[in-house]
Amino acid sequence: MTSATLDRTGALSLLARCDELAAHSTLPGGLIRRVYLTAEHRAVNALAGQWMIEAGMRTWQDAAGNQCGRLEGSTPGLPALLLGSHLDTVPSAGRYDGILGVLIAIAAVDRIHASGIRLPVALEVVAFGDEEGTRFGRALLGSRALAGTSDPAWLDLTDEQGITLREAYRAFGLDPDALGAAARQPDDLVGYLEAHIEQGPYLEEAGHALGIVSTIAGARRFSLTVNGRAGHSGTPFERRHDALAGAAEIVTVIEATARSAGIIATVGHLEVFPNAVNVIPGRVELSLDLRAESDADRDGVWKQISDALTEICDRRGLTVDARQTHSAPAVACSARLRDAVAAGIARTGNADPLFLLSRAGHDGMAVAAVTEIAMLFIRCRGGVSHHPDEHVLAADVAAATDAFEAAVLALVAAETPRSPAAPADAAAPAATPPA
């Protein structure tokens, strides 16, 4: 391995790259907001593509705007082990959620390429363009396109400016009617590995730098609208139909029900109409995000909450409308790939890693529709994520990169050599300049 490779794949270099990517944002004052199919998305794809080329990969941007790179195996056209994460962010984000996983994947491929090892599979890195769903309110658009599970109806989704997803694809230089070209087939892949900050406190509390994801929690999201009747604030209580009072009771019932069942429920958005100091609220819109390790547990809690919504609103003279906006099943990580991650962590000196439920969603949830997945978790200070205070230690990033590289090598060492899945030109789109 050359000194140049060591320099650009070391922890300090990866952290500096995180800082470089963080500069591409629509928010002032060093805050980060970078969303799908924008100038900022184009800029970080270009940087990631440049770093992929330095790592020995040929690159292309797929039909969904995901930035991709490929290092051929011992024979051109072999099925690929997919590595990656996402480059988009939530508003006022940290600089490591998703981003660090992309950079660790690139670094692992860079090191393997520099070593001269010829693998029995190809290695591909994908930097997904949309995991968070910030712009169009629909998460995992990039990875769902790769998995071939995109819904054509999503092309009519709109952002805050009324721009449809279809229009945004075209403005980005992509053909929305050719989105299916981004889809991979199971025979093209041997698995998917992702490194990600934990987004929880458990590694830190246990004194571990790294951990293994057992399952990604299944999630359902709902838009709830409570309807009452607006009126003057002097109206007696017995004559009110106060939508906000009903919504407040609903929020507390949601929390109590989820706590009792041991699952996660979050009301993160609430909007009051007409939102005046001397007017009884006539309508309240709120969100609900439900997550659980078991889909059955999650759905059972939703049934309890739904029944409670009806009871509360009937009692208060209100009506409620519940519309599901997102659904993703719980995804158990592959035992075969988990074993490889465990072997990688063992190379860093920890032979007894923690297995953790991921309560947050990840691109792997979508990729699991087309291949097996596993994830490496990296300690994050205080478990803080989706916030400017996201923080990782350079020593942990170094350990994660070593472990991820070792996991890739452990996995492919056990891989039975296959014949090429397709000619080299068909195994991945022809290289194009990074967008």
Image (cartoon, rainbow, N blue to C red):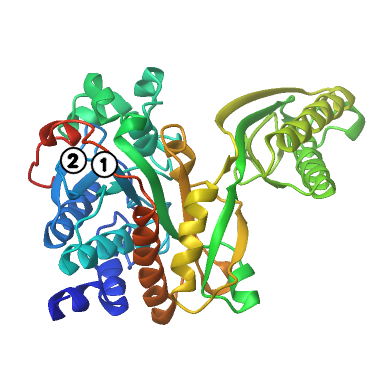
Is residue 52 found left or right of 87 in the rendered image? left
* Residue 75 point in image, percent of width and height: 16, 45
Above or below residue 334? Residue 109 is: below
Q: Real-space Cα distance between discs 2 and 1?
A: 6 Å
The residue nearer to you, when weighing 333 against 16, is 333
Is residue 313 found left or right of 432 in the rendered image? right
Whether pointer 2 and pointer 1 mark residues with C-beta atoms closer than 8 Å, the reply is yes
* Residue 416 point in image, percent of width and height: 34, 45
Quadrant placement of the C terminus: top left
* Residue 326 point in image, percent of width and height: 54, 31
Q: Is residue 162 visible?
A: yes
The residue nearer to you, when weighing 240 against 411, is 411
Is residue 306 found left or right of 180 in the rendered image? right
**Helix, strand or loop under label 2:** strand
Q: Outermost residue toward the right?
A: 238
Is residue 29 found left or right of 346 in the rendered image? left
Residue plotted at (58% across, 69% down): 353
At label 2, which amino acid type do we have?
Gln
* Residue 365 point in image, percent of width and height: 49, 40
Q: Hey, which quadrant is residue 274 in on the image?
A: top right
Disc 1: which residue: 66
**Helix, strand or loop under label 1:** loop
Residue plotted at (19% across, 69% down): 115
Q: Hey, which quadrant is residue 186 in on the image?
A: top left
At label 1, which amino acid type do we have?
Asn
Above or below residue 323? Residue 45 is: below
Q: Is residue 280 visible?
A: no
Disc 2: which residue: 61
